[in-house]
Amino acid sequence: MPNPNYVHDCSRCIFLGSFTYMARYHKDRKSQTADLYYCPNKIDGSCIARFSSIGSDYSSFSSSIVKSNMSTWMSWADEEAESTASPALIEAYKRAVTSNLL
C-alpha cells in the first residue's frame, strides 16, 4: 500500500489508503484526495478522512454513525446538503470492514 499523502499525528490510527473523488464545493465539483484511517480509540472506533497535513483539516465520525447514516449520505450525492467529507468517510468505513477492523 502506498504511503499517506498527508501527515497524521495519531499513532493508533490504521492507514487504509488514499481515496480521490469528486467533492462538492458549493455548486462546483473538484477532485479531492483524502487519506483514510480507522482509529480503534472508542468502543466502535472512528472513521477518519484527512484532507491535508494541517492538524484540523480532517473529518471523523464513529463507525456506528457512518454505518447508520451511509444510505442518507449517499442519497445526497446530487444535492446541496452533501458533505464534501461524506464520500471519503463512507469509503473509510467500507475499507475498515473489508480489512476486518470492524
Image: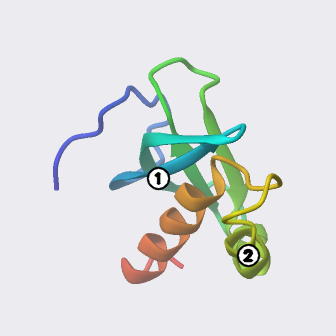
Residue shown at 72% from the left, 55% from the top:
61
Horizontal and vertical percent position of residue 10: 50, 35
Residue 54's x, y, as percent?
53, 17
The outermost residue toward the front is 27
Give, as a three-letter code, the residue at label 2. Ser
Q: Are marks 2 and 1 in contact (CB under 8 Å)?
A: no
Q: Tell me: 10 left or right of 43.
A: left
In the rendered image, which residue does mark 2 sit on?
75
Instruction: Report, in whole angstroms, how far the alpha carbon at label 2 lies from the one at label 1.
Output: 23 Å
Q: Residue at x 48, y 80 (%)?
A: 97
- At which x and y percent is residue 92? 50, 63
Decide: few, some or many residues near mark 2? Use Cα within 10 Å; few <14, some 14-19, many ≥20: few
Q: Is residue 29 left or right of residue 3?
A: right
Q: Secondary structure at mark 1?
A: strand
Give, as a three-letter code, the residue at label 1: Tyr
**Looking at the figure, which quarter contains the N terminus?**
bottom left
Q: How many marks?
A: 2
- Residue in the picture at 51% in, 38% down: 50
Q: Estimate how packed mark 1 is, as few (under 14), some (14 to 19) or many (20 or more) residues with alpha carbons within 10 Å.
A: many
Which corner quadrant holds the C terminus?
A: bottom right
Is 48 or 51 nearer to us in this picture?
51
- Give above or below for 78 relative to 85: below
Residue 65 shows in the view = yes
Helix, strand or loop at mark 2 = helix
In the rendered image, the vertical position of residue 41 relative to residue 55, given as above or below: below
Using the image, tell me which numbered label, if any, was put on residue 37.
1
Q: Using residue 19 as the reference point, say whether residue 96 is left or right of it.
A: right
State the image coordinates of residue 80 (x, y, percent, origin top left): 80, 52
> Which label sits in the foreground, 2 or 1?
2
